[in-house]
Image (cartoon, helix red, strand yellow):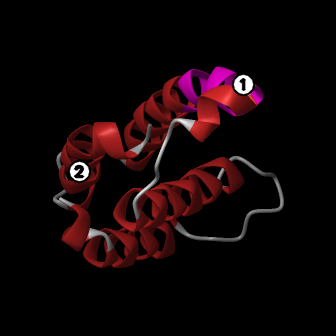
């Protein structure tokens, strides 16, 4: 599911790391997109019969892992115990973006 929207994620992440949007705007849009995809995935995961008809290629699975890591970074940024600076957050997103380039 996440892989089917990989270009939306790419556009969003690229816009953020190229300073076209604020950190708060990025997090807000990213979380919305991630939750939409997650909600689309839930019924499929619940229907084990439906899962048997899916074949998941490694690119899709690896991409989803990176997207989940970015989700965790975004989600954690709202935690009151978060000690990550905005610059550290952006550097983390840049690093993950460079790692997922092969999936676009």
- Whether residue 95 sits left or right of residue 44 in the image: it is left
Question: Residue 47's image quarter?
Answer: top right
Comparing 80 with 68, the one in front is: 68
Q: Please state the horizontal and vertical placement of residue 30, each as a whole percent of the image.
A: 44, 39
Q: Is residue 37 above or below residue 96?
A: above
Q: Please state the horizontal and vertical placement of residue 81, each as a whole percent of the image.
A: 83, 61
Q: Which residue is mark 1?
A: 47
Q: Which residue is mark 2?
A: 10
Q: Earlier in the sequence, mark 1 or mark 2?
A: 2
Q: Residue at x 45, y 74 (%)?
A: 92
- Main SS class of the magenta portion in the image: helix
Q: Nearer the viewer, mark 1 or mark 2?
A: 1
Q: Please state the horizontal and vertical placement of residue 71, each as a whole percent of the image.
A: 57, 51
Whole-angstrom CA distance, mark 1 to mark 2, is 29 Å
Say which quadrant the N terminus sits in: top left
Question: Residue 91's image quarter?
Answer: bottom left
Q: Please state the horizontal and vertical placement of residue 26, each as a whole percent of the image.
A: 38, 42
Residue 28 counted in the magenta span: no
Comparing 1 with 78, the one in front is: 1
Comparing 42 with 98, the one in front is: 42
* Label 2 packing within 10 angstroms: few (<14), some (14-19), many (20+): some
Say which quadrant the C terminus sits in: bottom left
- Whether residue 102 sits left or right of residue 38 in the image: it is left
Span highlighted in magenta in the image? 38-46
Q: Residue at x 71, y 70 (%)?
A: 83
Contact check, label 1 and label 2, Cβ < 8 Å: no
């Amino acid at each position: 599911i996440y892989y089917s929207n990989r270009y939306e994620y790419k556009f969003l992440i690229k816009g953020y790391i190229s300073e076209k949007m604020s950190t708060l705007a990025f997090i807000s849009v990213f979380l919305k997109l991630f939750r939409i995809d997650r909600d689309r995935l839930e019924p499929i995961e619940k229907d084990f019969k439906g899962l048997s008809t899916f074949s998941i290629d490694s690119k899709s699975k690896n991409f989803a892992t990176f997207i989940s890591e970015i989700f965790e970074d975004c989600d954690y940024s709202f935690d009151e115990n978060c000690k990550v600076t905005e610059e550290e957050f952006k550097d983390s997103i840049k690093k993950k973006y460079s790692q997922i380039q092969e999936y676009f």
